[in-house]
Image: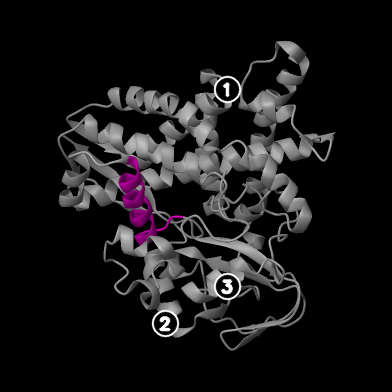
Amino acid sequence: MTEHAPTDEIRDDTDPSTFPDAASSSTAEPPVSDWNPRGPRARRDAVALYDDMRARCPVARGPSAAWTLFTHADVMAAALDHEIFSNGASRHLQVPNGLDGPTHTVFRALVDRYFTKARMAAVEPVVQRVAADLVGQLRVPGGIDAVETGSRFAVRAQSAWLGWPAELEGELLQWMEANRRATRSRDPSRTAEVARWFDAIIRSLTDARRRAGDEAPDDVTTELVRARVDGRELVDGEIVSILRNWTGGDLGSMALCAGVVLIYLADHPDLQARLRSGVPDQEFNAVLDEILRIDDPFVVNRRVTTESVTVGGRALAAGDRVFLNWTSANRDPRMFGDPERFDPVGNAPYNLVYGIGKHVCPGRPLATLELRALTRAVLEATTAIEPDPDRPRERELPPVGGFAVAPLILR
């Protein structure tokens, strides 16, 4: 759904050859690299490494000659300059994320109409019901893994929104785990396999609606199958790309967000108490955004330069790959002071969790609604969310942020 989906449309960004530490396929001597985004330091504490790089080498070249921008100013400038920093960085069709210019404008208008205020108001009771039902099945008091809970919620909420059958939950959960393992493996054949698997899931749903014709269910998926741009029907690859973006990336995104938010509330009982006292949606949303700014699980997105450009004193050539490190930008002390300081109102204008510019996340309204519904459901069903002293937390490995395992005690 979002530009910031950790898998960034599943393909490319789960292919190790597209990450800046991948081995160069060129026979030429590779340029000297400034850092290793998947090296031992990144695996030990990626956020600390990003903080260090931002201070020491804010525009850094990786082993495969791709550049990473770390400062808030540089990331924001690149995100806003879609002429020089093109989104067309993938060899696969990505709608609308990987499009630029008038083509992006047309498809962005199509996608935006699925996330209007009226549509979100209509789907909110459905999402709230999904969250309440799921949380009602948890053992309280008892232990949970917030990421696993977030995964189940993401599958059910997205399926309810899109009109997908409940029987698909098991396969989608299996796919999410397979995709996570493939991403960690750095094996292009495994990432390609899970991409094909997900495409097959989507095509089975869209093909069924085409066969049903006028008898197809009245849902978002059917509406997309029948959608038109510039007076023509969408081709199959465009439909699959949009649904892949909405689901394949968003399922993992919601799981990671749930882990980050619930862990943060467990570690900050005063904030937890404040939310339990009852706050309006707008304030609740600001709290969620600020938690995600402090520990942003959406680490990078890619761009490719269309002409030579100088950033932070470094000369980038036309055609260079560039990674915008949102996690680092959202912790830049030149913008936020102490990056750990919790200030939802003061930091909101500079928060880049959902991006900025023409490619700002179109699915932000639904993602926020879902995360708010799940968090509120957990708070309403408990008297306390606490760290689990007997089970260690496990961070996700780059290129993904957040937690792989987020154990908590619910009381």
Residue type, label 2: Ala
Q: CA distance from mark 2 to mark 1?
A: 47 Å
Q: Secondary structure at mark 1?
A: loop
Question: Where does the image place residue 273, in percent across and percent down from the top left?
Answer: 16, 44
- The residue indicated by pointer 1 is 163
For residue 370, side relative to residue 18 (left or right):
left
Question: Where does the image place residue 258, in percent across and percent down from the top left?
Answer: 37, 43
- The residue indicated by pointer 2 is 55
Residue furthest right in the image: 232
Q: Is residue 327 visible?
A: yes
- The residue indicated by pointer 3 is 77
**Range covered by the magenta-colored residues:** 281-297
**Magenta stretch: dominant SS?**
helix
Q: Quadrant of the N terminus?
A: top right
For residue 35, side relative to residue 406 (left or right):
right
Q: Secondary structure at mark 2?
A: helix
Residue depicted at x 65% and y 27%: 221
Q: Quadrant of residue 135?
A: top left
Residue type, label 3: Ala
